[in-house]
Amino acid sequence: MDGLILVNKPQNLTSHDIVAEIRKLLKVRRVGHFGTLDPLATGLMMVGLGKATKLFPFLSKAVKSYRGVMRLGFSTDTYDSTGQPTSTEKKDFPTKQSVRKAMKKFEGAIEQLPPPFSAKKYKGKPLYSLARAKKEFELRPARIFIHFLRLKKFKLPFLEFEVRCSSGTYIRSLAHDLGHSLGCGAHLIELTRTGVGNFHLEDCFTLEEIKKLAEVNKAYKFLHPLESLLPEFPKIILDDQGSSSAENGRLIFAENIQKIILPSPSLSTDSSESAVIFRMFNPQGKLLALAKKMPEKNCYHPFLVIDLSLIHI
């Protein structure tokens, strides 16, 4: 079984738990997720099966959307409600106007430090293991991009918000840093991922729904096939000879191309890769490889072959 499943992750399960559950439900060995969600968080989680896991470098980079709630008044060591307070509680809260103004300052390209309790690696070890052992380590900032951070409801001490951001953004850090900026401290108490690229929360299935559909052989209802993935990349349809070359990772020339189909303008993407990466298909519509154009040789190079077992002798 190959493809992508959009799982509606419940609270208190880790991303690893979701992968293990899908592996057990569908009896598929090769399963992986395209972007971690903390146990506290709920919502859209992309899980790849079989050959779809090869697309991790591309699907994991998609822009993410969230809605959530943060509590003003004090910060915690985990930057969310599962941690211990690290500041005394304050009741002197900012105005709605001050909050909106502070949120605006986080939009655009910024440097962000990960939470001390996170899966981010330091010298090969996850930060949470070092933090739990009370060992010293250096938090290193990462360059991220916040497309927008909006206040949806102002009901002190709680702030409901929505955010659209680049891959690699920690919403817990965003809440923590906003609290520091406001001078009253803050931490995350609720978070739901509502979108990843062109996928949305309303397209997700719960684990129970996936189980029931799998039991009646209706996996097609929740499984996005390989051929439907990365629609923002142009589509190249090859002839038989070109298909054989693509399956073996050999260069593809113009005479082996039947058609090039450009993506729909409605497919929004924030990645420059969508302009330089192409999906290659055989005449029967099977996805064979991802390729890059080589202008100097007037050809295409299949740099990621989907099924290496299709070797033509």
Image (cartoon, grey):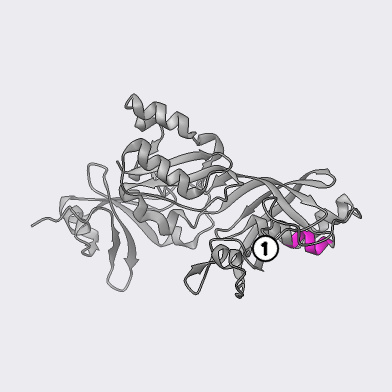
Name the one closer to the observer, 98 or 78.
78
Tell which residue pokes out farthest to the right in this image: 92
Identity of the amino acid at label 1?
A: Gly
Name which quarter of the figure residue 2 lies in.
top left
Q: How many marks?
A: 1
Q: Residue at x 23, y 65 (%)?
A: 251
In the picture, the quarter occupied by the N terminus is: top left
Would you call the spot at circle 1 few (<14 residues within 10 Å), some (14-19), or many (20 or more)? few
Quarter of the image that includes the C terminus: bottom left
**Residue 70 or 290: which is nearer the viewer?**
70
Q: Nearer the viewer, residue 204 or 297?
A: 204
Q: Which residues are magenta?
A: 177-182
Q: Quadrant of residue 165?
A: bottom right
Image coordinates of residue 232 in percent, x first then y, are 44, 51
Give the vertical position of 5 relative to 186 (above or below): above
Q: Position of residue 127 (x, y in %)?
A: 56, 66
Residue at 36%, 57% in the rendered image: 278
- Tell me the SS state at disc 1: strand
In the depicted structure, whether residue 312 falls above or below residue 266: below
What residue would you read off at disc 1? 108
Quadrant assignment, res 11:
top right
